[in-house]
Image (cartoon, coloured by chain):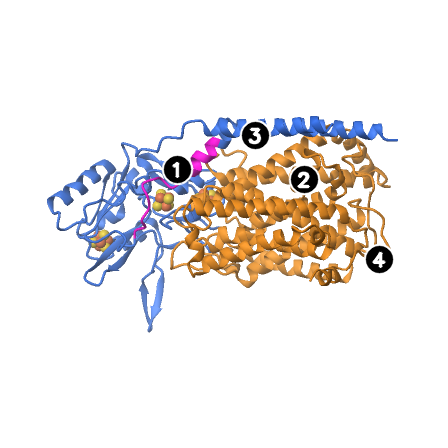
Chain colours: A blue, B orange
Amino acid sequence: MSISRRTALKGLLTAGAVAATGGTARAALPPKRPDPEAVGLLYDSTQCIGCRACVTACRDANGLAPQPTSLRGAAYDAPTDLNAHTKTIIKLWNTGDAHGYVKTQCMHCVDPACVSVCMFSALHKTAGGIVAYDKDACIGCRYCQVACPFDVPKFEWASATPKIVKCELCRDRLAEGKEPACTAVCPRKAVIFGKRSDLLREAHHRIAASPDRYVPTVYGEHEAGGTQVLYLSSVSFAALGLPALGDQAIPYFTENLQHAIYQGFIAPVVLYGALAVVMFRNRKLTEESQEGQP
Amino acid sequence: MRAAELNGDARPVGGPIFTAGFNALLAIVGACGLVIVWRLFRGLGAVSAMNDGYPWGIWIAYDVVSGTALACGGYAVALLCYVLNKGQYHSLVRPAVLTSALGYSLAGFAVLLDLGRYWNIWKAPFLLNWNRNSILLEVALCISAYTVVLWIEISPAFIERWRDSTSPLLRGIAERLTPFLNRTLLWFMALGILLPTMHHSSLGALMLIGVSKLHQLWFTPLLPLMFVVSCIAMGYAVVVFEATVSARLFKRPHEHKMLTSLSGVMVGVLTTLVGMRLVDLISRQRIGLAFTPDRYALFFWLEMAAFITPAILLAPKDWRRDPGIQFLSALMMMVAGTLYRFDVFLVGFNPGPQFSYFPSAFETLVTLGLIAVEVAAYLAIVKRFPILSGAPVAAGPPGLVSGLRAAS
Ligand code: SF4
Ligand code: SF4
Ligand code: SF4
């Protein structure tokens, strides 16, 4: 009896191993390439004067009420970070020797972590690679907030019917043939809208034309698998507060893992079958041994 | 009914349900209910300390991630009983499966509370845009399915009771279900092993997306495996914990021999876990982080100590036989596994210096309330339904405290 039990167990282990290796032996998914039609922003921090016209224009275009904070009796609309009412913000960077401004909003990643984790694709890529939000498919799990390496999606904590809030690159304005509110209003053309490929060319062109003015790389060209919002800077991107992320897209590893294990659902089915075989055999063995006893 | 599945010598404990302790539990549940109503009308921000940097708080880290792991008793014992065919553990199956069924149901309820837009869930079956890359989707489907499986696994306990019921309706249900269960129960039990293996590994995989946010002491491609192995340890620990407490509480015979050999199994599981953890850190060259004086290293060592101590306590055979040591070790293992999950989901999670999180009083009250529901339901069910084995004995099991004293 103990021999047959051992055989059964061995069978189970083999099935498990086959299931596991059958999955991992499959070739890894290729990294996602940017859509040739992808659109985005190019923000040149050396051009930005910190006027915050873009922040106000973004509020107006998206129907977001100002967030007054009062200081010594006077009211200011001065949020300190992106929040449930603020889809873009201008912050100051300061290295001691120099200072300047940096604009923050959704990066519209080429392979976005937020989209990868969202159960019913409430966050999804739409025309031009824009990462859009559909509140009717959102269950409010906030996994997108956990996943986004730039801490972009914000949640309406104070609402009983909360939504996720983030920049959608003014996709309703784009549909009307207009450009995003921030690029339309910017007096210095510090932030411009266009096709990602064109913006990238423009960025490298600016670096080549004035190499003393810029650090020689474009943030977002490769970071986290590439983003559709690109940055130029005169100081290190770390000084601007942009995170140092490798070139691999954030979801690359998890999606490969998920595909390896669950592709075609083969591994779970094999494992289930093997478990059932072992358990039925065990029951038979138990019953036989019980019959043998008085 | 097949004896192996419908554990014949289990009996209801009997006695009054509304004891002082039970009423105290109900009071906590009531307070928790008020907070839940408040949350429904005023939003999550009104009751919890969660924020945009820490969008998941203790409702996820404890109620869901740790709660389902602590509810792994059914999984761990079923593995032993039905896969490794160690029939001697049968009398532990029912109470373990009951705790699991309660634990998972409550975890499911906690998820609903935590979801900002819970009303959109009903659409899920009709939404065509299921995202198969989403690990959370896999977790959600798997946990829901497993909760149903657990209630099916425990249903014989209800059916046995209903068969003798005076109500023709309940009798009818029992009679109709019995042949169905006889035919299919084993298939469900196989599912009952497959599903937890799947979703506990996925619960670990959830945080693999935190490439830039989860501290390197915890971020490892082995997270899924670590979660499975540690939930098995927690499952065994809960079985020991619960068997000891109910023997005490209901004056049942202490399943001494069984708990001793279970404790032996735990030494193996714990050693594997700690070994994996260290080998992983060394091979990824991250072990140095454990010696950097910061709060991450502190929590890492707390967690390691909580895993290693029970392994040491249970290793010598004569210590392992001591009910006091068994109980203490089981408690530590439950703490260890929970701490590990808190470390992965909260302590080691760093969205940036501008954010911080510590659970609010209301948030904690909800968690306590859900635990109270679970304990109260367990007490009521074992009193009325055949879950626990054996007739009451006159004296309790060997004293826990005296056992401890003897050991030191
Ligand atoms: S920046 Fe964050 S929210 Fe925006 S697309 Fe990337 S992952 Fe998603
Ligand atoms: S909160 Fe909404 S948008 Fe974010 S991951 Fe969950 S379902 Fe998707
Ligand atoms: S509108 Fe243009 S110049 Fe003004 S803060 Fe925004 S990006 Fe800078």
Residue placed at 69% from the left, 40% from the top?
B151
Q: CA distance from mark 2 to mark 4?
A: 33 Å
Amino acid type at image mark 4: Ala
| SS for dot 2 | helix
- The magenta segment is A242-260
Amino acid type at image mark 3: Gly
**Tag 4 subunit:** B
Q: Residue under label 1, please give it.
A: A252
Residue placed at 77% from the left, 49% from the top?
B256
Q: Residue under label 3, please give it.
A: A16
Q: Tell me whether the residue at label 2 lies in contact with that at label 3, contact meaning CB atoms closer than 8 angstroms.
A: no
Looking at the figure, which quarter contains the C terminus of chain B? bottom right
Q: Earlier in the sequence, mark 1 or mark 3?
A: 3
Image location (x, y in percent) of residue B263: 68, 48
Q: Quadrant of ligand 1?
A: top left
Which numbered disc, 2 or 4, marks the residue closer to the eye? Answer: 4
Q: Residue under label 2, please give it.
A: B150
Which numbered disc, 1 or 3, marks the residue closer to the eye? Answer: 3
Comparing A131 with B364, the one in front is B364
Q: Is residue A114 visible?
A: yes
Furthest residue in direction right, as rendered: A294
